[in-house]
Image (spheres, grey):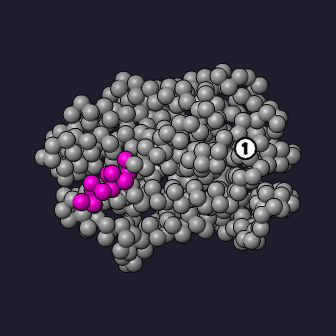
Amino acid sequence: MEKGNRANFGSKLGLILATAGSAVGLGNVWRFPYMAGQNGGALFIIVYVVCVLALGIPCIMSEFIIGRHSASNTARAYRKLAGKTPFGLVGYLGVLTGLLVNGYYAVVSGWCFEYIYASAAGQLNGDPQFFADFFNTFEKDPVKPIFWAVTFLIVTHLIIIRGVKDGIEKASKMMMPALFVLLIVLVVASCMLPNAWAGVEYLFKPDFSKVTKELFLGALGQAFFSLSIGMGCLCTFASYFSKETNLTSSAMQIGIIDTVIAILGGLIIFPAAFSVGVSPDSGPSLIFITLPNVFQEAFGGIPVVEYLVALSFYILLSLAALTSLISIHEVSTAFVEEEFNVSRNRSATIVTAVSMVIAVLCSLSLSDLDIICLGGKSLFDWLDSITSQILLPLGGFFTCLFLGWYVPKKIVKDQYTNWGTMPGKYFGVYMFCMKFLCPICILLVFLHQFGVI
Ligand code: TRP
């Protein structure tokens, strides 16, 4: 498809909400709080914010630059700039990563749907052991998680086939404000609990004795995941930006929205947990095992509220997951549509079908059936670690090197300054980040994950 008839976002607000919708996801409401809980609360947040500002925002910019310059899907976008060099493969790597993440993200998103259902049906009621059993039984069920993951993918599919403006942008314009309202209501409810202040303090009062190497690397990895960096999501969305879009300010707005929402997520979870004396460092099971119990103890006995808090929280989680899954899906949909020259409908169907197969296999690998496990790890865990620890950092790393060292500076500067119509004040700083700071930091995280440092 050529530049002229390519889809575009309809408005600036729509563009920001859709891109922020990609960034705001399970990473903010599920992963960020447990990472902060395990890494000393406030200290983690400070390091995280520095990572977002110094590394995350420049990396968002580079995906924007590549995407808008090429106005095509991620694979073609890199290929157009890379010529015959191996940098062209980075785009394909992104599309492949996207497809794998799509299937696996759908599984966790499906869990959110189950928890909406369970809280609406009043099933989330019992002692702490009950909540652990509830989650484990559900996760090991061979049918239920598949049902919800497939349902989630169908909803995503129905939005994707409507296109960029009428599907993705419209859905984000409806879902993001709803998400924000729910978030604020839950923050207020949580912060009004007795002893909630201890949780707020934990989030904002750093304890410098807790500095560890894991803290820095954890924060950097979280920043990249949460900002959707490393697999062409932002590149695909930027291919729908117009010539007037200010890339720097859009990247900054998205970084800020994403960080504010992650902190607000923390302001729901920590005050509630501290108010009932539960420590928020339980790791990935925080949202699905610890939290429903915390909600029940904190709000139990207050009629209506008791019932609504858990329900609203899981609706919030599902909305966040949905806007992100849409963006992950779009990477592959745009690729199939343009590279194989098929209609959007057909390409979305192919991507949904493949994602469903991956999601079903992922779910089954967690179930009691004990299949599709390799080396003692389920397919779900494999996909989780291969994508987030290897493929995403690799994508980010090569993108920085590509933009910093290979792509002609004029192209980068034209995009940065909208063809000279805007001042390129921090262009030098940006190039420094691309050439040195970002690749070195990503490399450090990468090497650490393999025990080299
Ligand atoms: N950023 C999303 C979250 O916080 C997840 C996500 C969407 C993502 N697209 C991505 C992560 C691309 C990495 C790469 O949940």
Image quarter where the N terminus lies is top right
The answer to whether 128 is drawn above or below residue 100 in the figure is: below
Residue 342 at x, y = what percent? 73, 23
Q: Which residues are magenta?
A: 182-192
Tell me which residue sits at (37%, 58%) in the image.
266
Q: Would residue 255 be found to the left or right of residue 410 on screen?
A: left
Q: Would residue 140 be found to the left or right of residue 296 on screen?
A: right
Q: Nearer the viewer, residue 26 or 85?
A: 26
Residue lying at the far bottom in this picture: please name it: 209
> Quadrant of the rendered structure where residue 84 is?
top right
Q: Secondary structure at mark 1?
A: loop
Tell me which residue sits at (66%, 41%) in the image.
10
Tell me which residue sits at (70%, 57%) in the image.
246
Identify the amino acid type marked 1.
Ser
Q: Is most of the magenta stretch helix, strand or loop?
A: helix
Asked whether residue 28 is in view, the answer is yes
Asked whether residue 379 is in view, the answer is no
